[in-house]
Image (cartoon, rainbow, N blue to C red):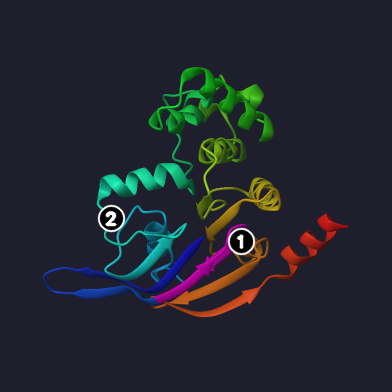
Amino acid sequence: MITIKNLTKIFRTEEVETAALNGINLQINEGDFLSIMGPSGCGKSTLLNIIGLLDSASGGNYELTGKEMIGLKEQSRAAVRKENIGFIFQNFNLIDELSVYDNIELPLIYNNVKASDRIKKVEEIAGILGISHRLKHYPQQLSGGQQQRVAVARALVNSPKIILADEPTGNLDSKNGNEVMELLTELHAAGATILMVTHSDYDASFSQRTIHMKDGIIFSEKKNQRNMDVFMDAKN
């Protein structure tokens, strides 16, 4: 699904040139659940933003579903983004002036989905995530965990091929954070492809594998036993 080869990202000012990514190689297959960890400034969010087509690389190759993304103009990146990628952010990024229903519906409007289909899709995803009774509420009337469920619903309503999660539990207490991680685990078990940036070893343990970054490179990768145990339990 995603193939990255020798990916680089250089930030330049008049006085300084900084290599945020320095020759990244990464393969993510359909149905993978991958965590990216590392200290602040290591390049993990930059990598996620490039994969999410929110930023462009300086060099290398990035193929998404067999198509090269490097060099695409913003209009083309936006079209690919809308069709393929769902985002879950640390700060939820919900619009306070819109109801839960309207927040979830927004990506469907951007994708020109007709009104009758929008109603069906919003109600269906709200039911799956257990927030049907909150559709008329506004974000500030919800708990942090409920707001993140709305954000997840918004990310999933267009049935994206890949979910990108940037510190999805960063603003949540342990109970709500654990609920979000269990939700992501359920989505993965149902076939979702997930790429998550996190500082939490605990959150990373829910994924299949974790890569560690430092100074713009990937220096280690490991498989996670928790995810393997959950997968075996699901099979049995």
For label 1, count other residues whose C-alpha is less than 10 Å away and answer few (under 14), some (14-19) or many (20+): many
Reading the image, the residue beneath label 1 is 32
For label 2, count other residues whose C-alpha is less than 10 Å away and answer few (under 14), some (14-19) or many (20+): few
Q: Amino acid at mark 2?
A: Leu
Nearer to us in this view, 61 or 168: 61
- Residue lying at the far left of the rendered structure: 14
What secondary structure is the magenta-colored segment mainly?
strand
49 lies left or right of 187:
left
Nearer to us in this view, 40 or 103: 103
Q: Amino acid at mark 1?
A: Asp
Residue ID at (62%, 69%): 209
Q: CA distance from mark 2 to mark 1?
A: 25 Å
Residue ID at (55%, 26%): 141
Which segment did they paint magenta?
Answer: 24-37
178 lies left or right of 74:
right
Q: Quadrant of the C terminus?
A: bottom right
- Indicate the secondary structure of the residue bearing disc 1: loop
Residue 39 position (above or below residue 108): below
Q: Which mark is residue 221?
A: none
Q: Position of residue 130 (x, y in %)?
A: 68, 32
Q: Position of residue 119 (x, y in %)?
A: 55, 21
Q: Are marks 2 and 1 in contact (CB under 8 Å)?
A: no
Residue ID at (29%, 75%): 19
Q: Position of residue 149 (x, y in %)?
A: 60, 38
In reply to whether residue 46 is colored magenta, the answer given is: no
Q: Which mark is residue 72?
A: 2
Task: Between label 2 and label 1, give the one nearer the viewer.
Answer: 2
In reply to whether residue 35 is colored magenta, the answer given is: yes
- Indicate the secondary structure of the residue bearing disc 2: loop
